[in-house]
Image (cartoon, rainbow, N blue to C red):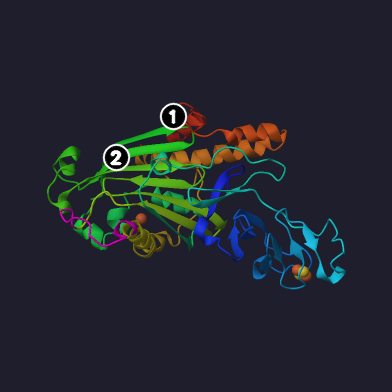
Amino acid sequence: MIPNQWYAILRSEDVKKKPVGVTRFSKKLVLYRDTRGKVVCLDDRCPHKGVPLSHGQQHGDLIACPYHGFQYDASGQCVHMPVLGKNGTPPKAMCVRSYALREEHGLIWFWTGDEQATPVGEVPMFEEFSSYQGFTSRYGWDAPVHYTRYVESVCEVYHVPFVHKGSALNIWDPKGGRVDNFECHLQGTLIRSEFILRADDERTAEETLTAKTPWTRGWRIGVDVLMPNMVQIRNDVFDVYLIATPIDDDNTWVCVCYKEPKRDLLFPFIKPLPIPGWRRVRPWLMCRMERYIQQAKDMEALRGQTPRISHLKANKLLPLDKVNAHYLRLRESLTQAALSQRAEPASQAIHFVARHPTATEPSHTNVAQSATSSLLS
Ligand code: FES
Ligand SMILES: [Fe+2]
């Protein structure tokens, strides 16, 4: 993972009344909600004899270890040890690390900064979702792949005609395997691209977009990456973002979020069913299809991919893979910058990550643009 970044680690609804244990960034963490509903995150290991706190119970704002009942507050300090009696004073050293969190956009965000650095800056989110008022659905699961390879697998879509050719949607409305009109722009730590995915025939790219029959139609698609680990796919049917947060070197927590579809892909002339809640059901269903139909195929295709962890020299990329190249370059430059800032006072280190990407702030643009010089032409 990249230091000094906000990463989504769970959906808000994943932390309810009981402590939840998860592994992220190869760390075992326990999360629970205090009595005001604020999410607390601690190392999931009681320092007494190493039992996971996530196996314990919550008592008000405290979490109790199941082994000898030591209770810890939100700062990770042990505040009660039954063995010492109710007036006993737990030693200061009996504590676990606590972590800074935010809860926004229906997600719980973890700060990957140094212990002493105070997290600042906004959590990353695509503008298309942060300003959206309609229904969305989020779904999360674990994928057996390193998160860099996961990001790469969704930051291009010209694998769709091959990997997903058997899916019902792709048979009805195939996208073809040729990419035209590709454009890619950097806006700070946001990479945006647009292109037309179409069948390779005599028509112009624009002509394929207006074809009446779905099976001859081309698709105008946008694929964006927002650092450190989010990908958005836009087209005239749906908008979706996908988050890939490291669990460890072999596994990734994936979270997808779909908006309501803009039109019905299979039956475009039929109005949405007059069933109460149908508008909520459609993004819910699309999330499940993403996991069980699309991503199952992606994981099959990625099996055995080497090297397991991607980096700038791991691939031979095409000019059409510019989004991928920019992602790897930004990952490296953000990591290097964060590591070099560690030697400096925390207040300076914070400024680097506090900057939210805007269209007018081309930080890292030059670094990332140089990534394209290594593309095959
Ligand atoms: S191991 Fe947790 S209280 Fe003893
Ligand atoms: Fe795919």
Position in image of residue 179 (x %, y %) = 27, 43
Mark 1 and mark 2 residues within 8 Å of each other at the beta carbon: no
Closer to the N terminus: mark 1 or mark 2?
2
Give the residue displayed 55% in from the left and 62% down from the top.
Answer: 16
Give the distance between the C-alpha atoms of the residues marked 1 and 2, in whole angstroms: 20 Å
Q: What segment carries the magenta color?
A: 267-280
* Kind of residue at disc 2: Phe
Q: Residues within 10 Å of mark 2 (few under 14, many from 20)?
A: some
Magenta: main secondary structure equals loop
Q: Secondary structure at mark 1?
A: loop
| Depth order, front residue of 229/137 | 137
Give the residue displayed 40% in from the left and 40% down from the top.
Answer: 131
Quadrant into which the C terminus falls? top left
Position in image of residue 21 (x %, y %) = 61, 64
| Residue 93 occupies quadrant | bottom right
Give the residue displayed 29% in from the left and 60% down from the top.
Answer: 278
The reply to whether the magenta stretch includes residue 273 is yes
Residue located beneath label 2 in the image: 195
**Up-down relation of residue 74 to residue 208 (above or below):** below
* Kind of residue at disc 1: Ala
Query: Which of the two discs, 1 and 2, sits closer to the camera?
Result: 1
Ligand 2 image position (quadrant):
bottom left
Relative to residue 305, is residue 279 drawn left or right? left
Does residue 177 appear in the picture of this structure? yes
Q: Secondary structure at mark 2?
A: strand
Residue at the bottom extreme of this rendering: 67
Q: Residues within 10 Å of mark 1 (few under 14, many from 20)?
A: few
| Depth order, front residue of 264/335 | 264
Give the residue displayed 43% in from the left and 49% down from the top.
Answer: 152
The reply to whether the magenta stretch includes residue 175 is no
Tag on residue 359? Answer: 1
